[in-house]
């Protein structure tokens, strides 16, 4: 069954804005609701923007009032600068995810949840294999930053999946995204190299 009413978190960021725009262009999707604390700088098509903070329980009202059936949680932030510092980044990533999952758990309409994560959860130990499968465990879990946040987020998502087995849950583990509008350390570093 195709999604009909979709909520996209993080629509003020490039990935969220792009996904919301593509979904809004699909005539079979009835409604796309984009949430973020910042106003998007790009046109999101027919996406209805709601200025909302996923760290607050009010996100549950957005989901219930709009009859959302699919939630795309793309607001897991990779860089502290884009979030207002490391503390704000962790709060958005971990507390925001917990609040969003609580809202989805209460919902009677949500049937699908997709969560953005990262391949950084595998860690980077010199003892790790060169190639990970879904069954491979890292030698040591990340201890700081975005990777640690992602490990926590995925743990909460697994718990949610056990509590609500009726909701299809997908976790997407992205690598660093590079491009002219990407907002991450690797992108900044490559820009410095090409500008010099």
Image: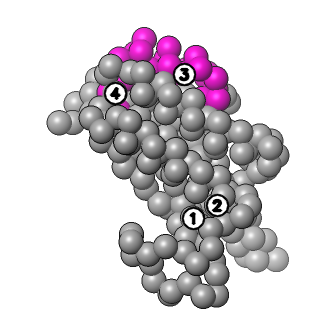
The Cα–Cα distance between marks 3 and 4, rounded to whole angstroms, is 13 Å
Badge 2 local density, few (<14 within 10 Å), some, or many (20+)? Answer: many
Q: CA distance from mark 3 to mark 2?
A: 25 Å
Say which of 25 and 20 sits in front: 20
Q: Is residue 58 magenta?
A: yes
Picture residue at 34% right of the left edge, 34% below the top: 164
81 relative position to 129: left or right:
right
Q: Which residue is mark 3?
A: 59
Q: How far, Cα to Cα, is label 3 from label 1?
A: 27 Å
Which residue lies under the disc numbered 2?
A: 147
Q: Which residue is mark 1?
A: 121
Query: Quick check: marks 3 and 1 in contact, CB under 8 Å?
Result: no
Viewer-side residue, 86 vs 34: 86
Q: What span is colored magenta in the figure?
A: 48-70
C-beta proximity under 8 Å, tags 1 and 4:
no
Q: Residue at x 64, y 81 (%)?
A: 125
- The image position of residue 140, as x and y in percent, is 62, 73
Circle 3: element type: helix
Residue 21 seen anywhere in this rendered image of the structure: no
Res. 193 image quadrant? bottom right
Marks 2 and 4: in contact by CB < 8 Å?
no
- Find numbered disc 2 in the image and state the secondary structure of the residue it sits on: helix
Q: Are marks 1 and 2 in contact (CB under 8 Å)?
A: yes
Q: Earlier in the sequence, mark 1 or mark 2?
A: 1
Residue labelled with disc 4 = 110
Q: Earlier in the sequence, mark 4 or mark 2?
A: 4
Q: Quadrant of residue 25?
A: top left
- In the picture, the quarter occupied by the C terminus is bottom right
């Amino acid at each position: 069954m195709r999604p009909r009413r979709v909520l996209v978190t993080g629509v003020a960021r490039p990935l969220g804005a792009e996904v919301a725009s593509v979904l809004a262009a699909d005539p079979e999707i009835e409604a796309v609701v984009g949430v973020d604390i910042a106003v998007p700088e790009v046109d999101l098509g027919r996406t209805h923007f709601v200025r909302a903070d996923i760290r607050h329980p009010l996100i549950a009202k957005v989901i219930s009032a709009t009859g959302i059936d699919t939630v795309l949680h793309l607001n897991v932030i990779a860089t502290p600068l884009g979030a207002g510092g490391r503390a704000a980044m962790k709060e958005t990533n971990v507390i925001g995810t917990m609040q969003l999952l609580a809202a989805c758990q209460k919902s009677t309409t949500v049937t699908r949840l997709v969560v953005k994560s990262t391949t950084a959860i595998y860690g980077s130990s010199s003892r790790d294999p060169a190639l990970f499968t879904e069954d491979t465990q890292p030698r040591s879990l990340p201890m700081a930053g975005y990777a640690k946040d992602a490990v926590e987020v995925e743990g909460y998502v697994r718990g949610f999946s056990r509590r609500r087995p009726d909701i299809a849950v997908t976790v997407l583990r992205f690598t660093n995204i590079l491009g002219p509008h990407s907002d991450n350390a690797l992108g900044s570093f490559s820009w410095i190299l090409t500008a010099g």
